[in-house]
Image: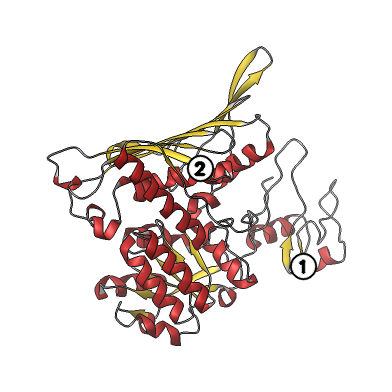
């Protein structure tokens, strides 16, 4: 018999066994040959959470925790600033899977698109604003935070404006177009006493979290090297990513940043030096202002060598491979929005076994948004605060310098840890 999944199926089972809810509460008789279900079997409330005992046998993997979403009125309300692809295709749909967060306002330069998005997500017309009147969010008590999905060079302005009206800020990566802009964002949020988090979604994604665990646990021995690749094919359509002023660079800050950031969160260290090269095919106007390719090698204090490659004019590849003393971890699509996988190779007796490690897929955007909401509710430092984004901005400047000078360059060390407490994977 399948596990019951809703109230209707439960009532059907009760009727089939000649039981009622009242009968359950009184310990009524079960079906012939079976004990009567109890309230414990059907779950209960403990510490404000609905909980169920594990119904599976010892041979099966235990079921996960009950979702326990917050009631809508208790969730952190977000104003979505910018209705480009990242907001409309990824962030807004992720709120449907979030448990602590909800979209309550929009800020856009396209009134027609904003009205349509608002209609689809049940956002009142009074909560739809232009960029010019964004400050009206100050008077909306439902808005506790903003999500910024604008071109890189606009992150600073809207972070500063949001902080000035007392709203917490979740900003897309890369944090800014320059180090100076990133530093100003950190300072503005500190002055306003609001939280700033950079949307490094991979640091919340289950397979990347598992890779971090493997490194820290030592189950495959010491980590020795990392290969990280993030490539994609950019079309001919005019877009802000080809504009250096708006983007701050080419493939490196847009998609190569995933490789850079991954090597840092996997090792738990900061690189000591880098050797880099950049390249742009001549004659193609797309690359007249930005680099098409960047390749960089990072050296870490523990001896880990990380080789990273990012390209804007190559077939899609978002893979990462970790080489340990006693095994290898392969992660196809490590940096993709979905579809992560993990394969672990290690000795198994006289053989080498390559096994797939499976984990429950979860929406990375929902995980990062809910993490920020939890930090707001509990007054905690986010796992990826502004300092994390600022450090990557500094490192990218050094990568560009190495490529320009054609030699290894030492990396700046942050004055303090750049990350907050590890995110919770519960829920």
At a point 64% along the width and 19% down the height, the residue shown is 347
Secondary structure of the residue carrying numbered label 2: loop
Q: Quadrant of residue 29?
A: bottom right
Q: Which residue is mark 1?
A: 47
Q: Where, quadrant-wise, is the N terminus in this rendering? A: top right
Work out whether residue 333 or residue 375 is closer to the camera in this orientation and state it.
375
Residue 2 as seen in the image, left or right of residue 341: right
Residue 219 lies, with reference to residue 158, above or below; the image says above
Instruction: Locate residue 298, reporting x and y percent.
Output: 46, 38
Instruction: Locate residue 109, reporting x and y percent.
Output: 26, 73
Q: Which residue is mark 2?
A: 271
**Which one is in front in this view, the residue at disc 2 or the one at disc 1?**
2
Asked if one can make out residue 269 in the rendered structure from this viewpoint, the answer is: yes
Instruction: Locate residue 11, reporting x and y percent.
Output: 69, 61
Instruction: Locate residue 57, reporting x and y percent.
Output: 77, 40
Residue 375 as seen in the image, left or right of residue 145: right
At a point 57% along the width and 44% down the height, the residue shown is 269
């Amino acid at each position: 018999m399948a596990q019951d999944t809703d109230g209707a199926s439960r009532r059907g089972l009760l009727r089939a066994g000649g039981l009622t809810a009242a009968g359950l509460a009184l310990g009524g008789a079960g079906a012939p040959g079976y004990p009567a279900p109890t309230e414990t079997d059907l779950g209960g409330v403990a510490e404000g959470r609905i909980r169920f005992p594990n119904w599976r046998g010892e041979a099966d993997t235990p079921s996960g925790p009950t979702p326990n979403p917050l009631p809508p009125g208790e969730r952190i309300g977000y104003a979505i600033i910018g209705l480009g692809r990242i907001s409309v295709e990824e962030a807004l749909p992720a709120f449907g899977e979030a448990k602590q967060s909800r979209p309550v306002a929009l800020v856009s330069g396209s009134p027609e698109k904003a009205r349509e998005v608002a209609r689809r997500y049940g956002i009142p017309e009074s909560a739809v604003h232009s960029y010019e009147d964004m400050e009206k969010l100050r008077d909306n008590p439902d808005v506790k935070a903003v999500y910024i999905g604008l071109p890189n060079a606009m992150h600073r302005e809207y972070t500063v404006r949001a902080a000035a009206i007392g709203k917490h800020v979740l900003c897309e990566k890369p944090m800014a177009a320059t180090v100076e802009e990133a530093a100003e964002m950190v300072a503005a949020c500190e002055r306003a006493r609001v939280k700033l988090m950079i949307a490094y979604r991979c640091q919340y994604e289950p397979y990347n979290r598992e890779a971090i665990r493997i490194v820290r646990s030592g189950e495959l021995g010491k980590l020795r090297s990392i290969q990280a690749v993030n490539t994609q094919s950019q079309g001919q359509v005019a877009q802000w990513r080809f504009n250096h002023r708006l983007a701050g660079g080419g493939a490196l800050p847009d998609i190569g940043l995933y490789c850079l950031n991954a090597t840092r969160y996997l090792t738990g260290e900061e690189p000591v030096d880098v050797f880099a090269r950049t390249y742009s095919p001549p004659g193609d106007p797309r690359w007249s202002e930005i680099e098409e390719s960047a390749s960089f090698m990072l050296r870490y204090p523990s001896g880990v060598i990380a080789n990273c490659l990012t390209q804007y004019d190559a077939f899609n590849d978002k893979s990462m491979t970790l080489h340990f003393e006693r095994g290898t971890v392969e992660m196809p699509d490590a940096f993709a929005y979905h579809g992560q996988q993990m394969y672990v190779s290690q000795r198994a007796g006289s053989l080498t076994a390559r096994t797939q490690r499976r984990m429950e897929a979860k929406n990375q955007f929902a995980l990062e948004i809910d993490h920020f909401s939890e930090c707001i509710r509990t007054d905690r430092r986010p796992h990826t605060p502004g300092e994390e984004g600022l450090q990557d901005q500094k490192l990218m400047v050094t990568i560009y310098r190495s490529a320009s000078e054609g030699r290894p360059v030492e990396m700046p060390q942050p004055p303090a840890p750049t990350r907050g407490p590890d995110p919770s994977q519960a829920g």
